[in-house]
Image (cartoon, coloured by chain):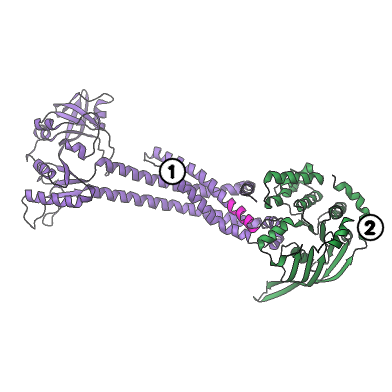
Amino acid sequence: MASMQAVHNANPLIQIEDLCKSYNLQGANGETITNQVLFSINLTINPGEFVAIMGHSGSGKSTLMNILGCLDTPTSGSYWLAGKNVAAMSGDELAHIRNQSIGFVFQGFNLLKRMTALDNVATPLLYAGIGRSQSRKRALELLRRTGLESFAMHQPNQLSGGQQQRVAISRALINEPPLILADEPTGNLDTQTSREIMLLFEQLNRDQGITIVLVTHEDDIATYAKRLIRLKDGHIIVDKRNEASETALNQAADGNSLITQ
Amino acid sequence: MNLFTIIGEALRALRQNRLRTGLTMLGMIIGVAAVVLMLSIGQGARTKINETIAAMGSNLFLVVPGATSSGGFSFGSGSVRTLTINDAYAVAELPSISATAPVTTGTVQLNYAAKNWSTIITGTTPNYFSVGNWKIESGAIFTESDLRSAARVVVLGSVTAKNLFGDEDPVGKTIRITNRPFLVVGVLMAKGQSLTGRDQDDNVLIPITTSERQITGNQFPGSIRYMMVQGKSAGDMDIAEIEITQLLRQRHRIAKGKENDFTVRNLTAIADVATDAAKVMSIVLGAIASVSLLVGGIGIMNIMLVSVTERTREIGIRMAIGANQRAILTQFLLEAMMICIMGGVIGLVVGIGGAWVVSRVADMLIVITIGMVGLAFLFSSAVGIFFGFYPAKKAASLKPVDALRYE
């Protein structure tokens, strides 16, 4: 399998060492309260992996996700993304990384309102400096491959949850990033749609070698991943290969229909 | 993201909130329209005054008989008749003076055919026309020989000509002035109102000799109502005033320490005061109008701040998919600027339209210059940048994670 070879040959895509994150809060009497969310996290993710990060709310999984996605900065420790020290980067450099190297998929879809699906998918290209007509052309091509072509001119509120999430995934894929970060991508979807979305992720991981990091608190969603990381109170307590994923892989045959050539 | 794309995005955002955009823009429209209207009214007033001053003639003195006060008791000027035609001829010989025109006045009844008209008659010399910057509409002015022979010739003011003759050409016709026949030799071009608001075109002019002997009569022969004196250069008006005063004191044999029995008025100085007043007026009008532009700008800032807060999540999403700070800043700044520039253009049109209406309704001269149009543009863009910058900066400084988490 292509993805397995990538794991062995390439440098780590994500390398986190001794990463801590704490927030300073203002107490009722004006004193500063430091709330530490992540404690000395060490984590290495290789290209082509499919990782599920699990944990209860307050475990720090969302904070870790935000740091992985360069949306937030660590308090201490180092974070290397594709060989680059992200912790030392300026705001504009981080914006460039988010644009080029990371695709985000959110629980609430986070599509831009009152904008067509096509324009939503095309927007990352605009921020990459590509002209509008060229961007739209590429976005339409991608929507065609994900079977959403007929919804290209629909606005998000005219689409079902599953359709919105597939538009969001298309938007995440448009700049062909090596990494997709999905924060509870199925949290707002019914079981059947959740399954379709997960199979789509699985397929992207398997066929295109895209590294996927998924945050979820649902066990059955986590089974699609090949590696399972469990966080508790800001510490990694479990980091293991996911035996259950083999079954998921066997189900993947159904997912072929989701991406048509 | 290139500029055209950002402009497209900004337009889309403005379209999404038409009512809000429209109301915000209204502040700019009113501001710019007010500035344009006030500037054009101020400019119109200045132009009008300058035209009046130019029509009045340049470097002018008005010399009237009588002191402004005598022994602490003030007489109205002209209340005594101490100036003579010969004084006027003598003043004309002074080195700093180019010409003088003695004037006698009276009120007369004019008749032509069945029409009659009462107006002011001016008896003067041919120099009067050049000194007072009068231009001839048709025919000619009376001549030195008319003056010497006390000929019965008359030059009509445009309003008088209109009243007596209607559309008929008066030149060559004979009118009766206090029942004496006079040949109309010329009609003056209209000048409009004087600085004091008097209609300068309702008058008739005849040689001063004719006037004295045949029309107004004179209990003090040779005395005049006033004289117009034109200095040679604007820079030497002070010297000219001293020369006139010295000469007249000498001619009138006024002992040292005694009051003048005449008064010299520098009309150019009066005109300068009027010009300054008009200038101050246009500055004050412009300043008042600028306040409304300022208020419009604050409205824009207010709405942009609300908009940034409302769209915090959108900003977060945009940052997550790769927008850098400059892209967000540019987007919001352009939205503010576009409201301002569109408001500015509409305001300009409304202002020009308003100026046109004012010029029609109030019969005022309104002047709109390219400079004012440019100023309105510059102002509205500047307001957009100034008041749009802070909200845009606020949007761009949001941390992506906080913006995304915003509900």
Q: Residue at x 89, y 50 (%)?
A: A255
Numbered disc total: 2
Report the front residue among A12 and B269: A12
Residue type, label 2: Thr
Q: Quadrant of the C terminus of chain A?
A: top right
x and y percentages locating residue B250 in the rendered image: 7, 50
Q: Is residue A50 inside the magenta stretch?
A: no
Which chain is in green here?
A: A
Farthest residue, direction front: A9
Kind of element beneath mark 1 = helix
Q: Which mark is residue B325?
A: none
Tell me the residue that label 2 is attached to.
Answer: A247
Task: Name the residue carrying label 1.
Answer: B370
Amino acid type assigned to the residue bearing label 1 in the image: Ile
- Magenta: main secondary structure equals helix
**Residue B315 occupies which quadrant of the picture?**
bottom right
Q: Nearer the viewer, residue B279 or A136?
A: A136
Tell which subunit mark 1 falls on: B
Q: Is residue B72 visible?
A: yes
Image coordinates for residue B96, horizontal then vertical, percent: 16, 47
Vertical comparison of B113 with A208: above or below: above
Q: Can residue A21 be seen in this view?
A: no
Please state if B364 lies on the left or on the right of B345 as rendered: left
Q: Chain B is drawn in which colour?
A: purple
In the image, the segment drawn in magenta is B323-334
| Quarter that holds the N terminus of chain A | bottom right
- Cα–Cα gap, marks 2 and 1: 77 Å
